[in-house]
Structure formats: C-alpha cells, structure tokens
Image (tube, rainbow, N blue to C red):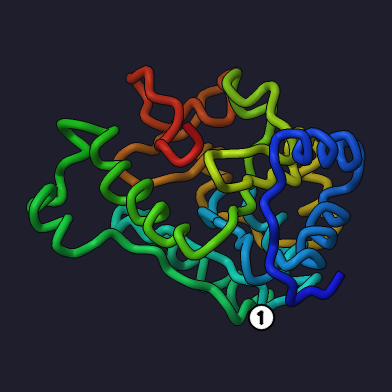
Amino acid sequence: MSESKQFQVPDQTGVDSLNEAFGSEAPQAVLRWLAGRGGRAQVPLVSSFGADSVVLLHMIAEIDPSYPVLFIDTGKHFYDTLHYRDQLKEHFGLTNLQAVTPDPDDLKEKDPRGALWITSQDACCDLRKTVPLARVMRNYSGWITGRKRFQTNDRADLNVFELDGDKMKVNPLASWGPKDVAAYIKAHSLPGHPLVPRGYLSIGCAPCTSPVEDGEDARAGRWKGSDKTECGLHI
C-alpha cells in the first residue's frame, strides 16, 4: 500500500486479527507496518520522554526521523525531563517533535496559581494532559504508546493493538519486561534519563512523581499515597 494512503482504523474484528498477526512480532515490525499504512501522518508517537521512552524514540527514528512525535508539555515536568527531551531530539535527529500544551485560558480559569495538583490530582491531569491531547487527537486516527504489561496490574492484559473509541492505540512494547528494555538500551548505547539512577522508574510531572522503593512496581512512584494509577490518557 502507498504510505500516503489515509490510515483506516479497523473495527474490533480487525484489531483482533492484528493482534493475532503481530502478537509475537518484534516492535520494529509493528512500527514498520504502521508507517507503511499511513501511520506517518495519522498515528503519531506520544512520548513522555520518561524512563523507557528512549527505546521507541530510537526505533521510530531509525524508520523515519520525520515521524511525528508528540510531547505533552504540562508545564509541570522535571527540568531533567525537558533537558532529556532536547538531548534526544538532537541525538536522534527528530525533525517533527511537537509540543502539546494546555489551553492558556483554561489554566487561567481552573488553575491560576498552578497548584491544582494539591487539591485534585485527577483534575490537574485532565486539565494539563487529557484535554490537550484529546484536542490534538481530533486530527489523528490514533497514537503509539510505550505502555507495557509488567508496569501495573491494570496493564497485565495489554494488547499490541486496541481500540479507544474511534481511535486506535498501538503498544509495540506491550510484551517487553525490564530486562528487554535494559538490553535494548545497552545494545544501542542509548542515553538514559538522568533521574533513573536516582530511583525514578516511571517519570511524570514533578509534583506527583517520587522514587520507587525496592520491591515496588515501576509505577509505584506515580501519585504515591493515593489510589490513582493512571493520568487519564489510558482510561
């Protein structure tokens, strides 16, 4: 098929067929298939530039450094994450990195002091992440995520392809574990996030992210002390 062809979101039967066909394939095969079906224009990579993000960013850059990459800039990220983002953009030659930001009027109305996360983490995530991405996603058919089954119990049954309303999410690394991620980073000598050696194994906004203790799952440092496990993008 022509790469310029409009990407068509399959129905649930089509998604099931894709999972059967690609369930045991390497992530690169999934990404190449997607790019060759119009994914370059319709299914961007949404990257947090967090602990494991370098893996998918490297894979995408090898396929096409002009592939669209969306970064949700909440205004609450660690400085280290913003510096790492700029470092990887230069390192991989990413030419189509786009920032997704909250609406300034919404921030002024709902979070004028920038402290909404103190009173309502859900509302803060909605304002700074979920709503901005949903607005941008009106122009796309879906997106690529870095989610993996090992990260939380909620993700244990994650498929490579899934429907989310009228959009399709693609999770090329769904079956990967920590050893797979570490081996890939080592094999390709990829630069790691500077906060990982300090115990940050899943990195989001600075106010709601803390180091992970021994024996905890990779996302235990997100919204610690609450029952919140997702920001809202994947609910």
What residue is rendered at 69% in x and 29% in y? 158
Against 135, is 17 above or below? above
Q: Along the horizontal axis of the image, is 113 left or right of 202?
A: left
> Residue 206 versus residue 170: which sits nearer the camera?
170
The x and y percentages for residue 28 are 84, 56
What residue is rendered at 73% in x and 62% in y? 190
- Split into 4 quadrants, where in the image is the N terminus? bottom right
Instruction: Give the quarter of the image for residue 233.
Output: top left
- Is disc 1 placed on a helix, strand or loop? loop
What residue is rendered at 57% in x and 66% in y? 69
Q: Which residue is mark 1?
A: 93
The x and y percentages for residue 118 are 18, 34
Against 37, is 178 above or below? above
Residue 81 visible (yes or no)? no
Q: Along the horizontal axis of the image, is 16 left or right of 72?
A: right
The x and y percentages for residue 23 are 86, 36
Residue 111 visible (yes or no)? yes
Q: Along the horizontal axis of the image, is 200 left or right of 30?
A: left
Q: Along the horizontal axis of the image, is 56 left or right of 83?
A: right
> Residue 21 versus residue 151: which sits nearer the camera?
21
Instruction: Give the quarter of the image for residue 44.
Output: bottom right
Instruction: Give the quarter of the image for residue 152.
Output: top right
Against 176, is 214 above or below? above
What residue is rendered at 54% in x and 51% in y? 50
Q: Dot 1, how many residues are within 10 Å of its Cα: few (below 14), some (14-19), or many (20+)?
A: some
Three-letter code for the amino acid on which mark 1 is drawn: Gly
